[in-house]
Amino acid sequence: MNVGIIGGGTMGSGIAQVAATSGCKVKLYDTNQTALDKAKASLEKILLRLIEKGRIDSEEKNRIQSNISYVDTLKDLSDSNLTIEAIIENLNIKKKVFSELESYVADDCIIASNTSSLSIASIAASLKNPKRCLGIHFFNPAPLMKLVEIIPAIQTSYETLEKAIDTISSWKKTVAVAKDTPGFIVNRVARPFYGEALRIYEEGIADFATIDHSLKSLGGFRMGPFELMDFIGNDVNYTVTETVFTAFYFDPRYKPSFTQKRFAEAGYLGRKSGIGYYEYDKDGKKVVGSDVIPNESAIQSDSEEFLKEQIFNRVLVMLINEAADALFLNIASAEDIDIAMTKGVNYPKGLLAWADEKSIDWCVLKLDELYSEYHEDRYRCSPLLRKMNRENKTFF
Ligand code: NAI
């Protein structure tokens, strides 16, 4: 299969590696020669590391590298069976590239976008044949992250969707099919992990380290929300939140946080700037006991264990509510929602399976407690959870 990748940055170069490893002939196109040189050099480094670790041999390295050619005109992608675009996140630029690309490729070539936040319908509309267009959304780093969200637009044909699912599955990725709505599955369902943690901090309930510790020790999350925001970058994470919030017509459930905004504005971006919610050394390792703002006003009267449980329950139930509401609105199947969170962001359990484990009754009770405390729309319980509770149902 011939695969054309447009944009040789972080995502494009990773996707090229994935496709080439699976035996596809890949052409990686970028307008910027420096980006192509960087992509080539970074692949060399990655493959050498894989040899060192004994994961591949030098023959395999040569095979992967010989499957990728680096091209500097869009026309070079004319023999592609599938193209995946991973250029700058700008609708007008993407549309221009898509309509030019369509004039070069064969009628049955699938034209996909790796966009995180733009609507696939709007991108597909730039094509004469929008039926061949869909979203194929990888996670960073593409070679390591198992999950790929596939997003058919309202224009996408069933045949295009089936072919895309088959191809991406043959690249040893786990596919979750998502409706063309803001954040697809992962970037929507994961919002409360950050948002509720920030809110708990802002209310003075606990400091960053306590909140992180609660989620890790009681929930089994590999990183706490503040560690993860520092890892992703507060600038990047804030922008995703703001984009999702705007795209949902300012639904208060997705409201961004001033704390994170100020951290981003201050340049406290996290690991990459050496300081975020914690401090980091030259190698990007967290400096122990380095909470940037220990929360002096944290409630002292509750026992530590009780406080941690309250924090964990609150974040978890908000995540479950978001996952349940995504199912309620047919964003994806229950299986795909759970797979997306375990494979896309490494959650220890699927959120809907977690809801079953805690009991739907518990979820409704906790959400209603939050709602009656705050009277904010953000804490409204999903109608699906309420209905399931009435009917004594479980997700699985
Ligand atoms: P990047 O900035 O690392 O790379 C973009 C590349 O596209 C650059 O090398 C640039 O020279 C090239 N480019 C820009 N305009 C072009 C054009 N008209 N024709 C050809 N090449 C062009 O960006 P990144 O992070 O790889 O993101 C690319 C896309 O993937 C975006 O749509 C983004 O939303 C999406 N995405 C990003 C993720 C991430 O974690 N970085 C995760 C999942 C999706």
Image (cartoon, rainbow, N blue to C red):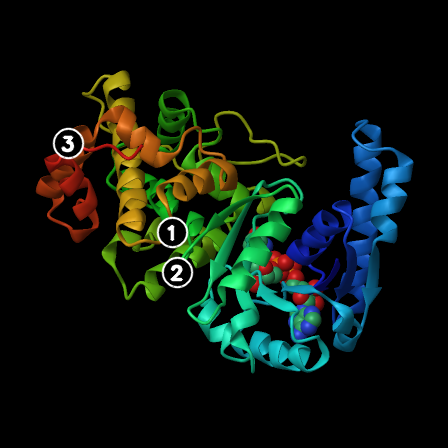
Q: Which residue is mark 3?
A: 392
The type of residue carrying mark 2 is Pro
- The tag earlier along the polypeptide, 2 or 3, is 2
For label 3, the SS is loop
Is the CB of the residue bearing disc 1 within 8 angstroms of ligand 1?
A: no
Residue 155 left/right relative to 331: right
Q: What residue is shown with label 1? A: 188
Q: Which residue is mark 2?
A: 182
- 254 left or right of 366? right
- From this view, report whether residue 223 is shown above or below residue 90: above
First reached walking from the N terminus: tag 1 or tag 2: 2
Mark 3 Cα within 10 Å, few/some/many (few <14, many 20+)?
Answer: few
Q: Which kind of residue does numbered mark 1 sit on?
A: Arg
Which quadrant would residue 88 be assigned to in this image? bottom right
Residue 182 falls left or right of residue 21: left
| Number of the front mark, 2 or 3 | 3
For the N terminus, which image quadrant?
A: bottom right
Residue 268 x/y as whole percent = 50, 48
- In whole angstroms, how far apart are the C-alphas of marks 2 and 3? 31 Å
Residue 382 can be seen in this image: no
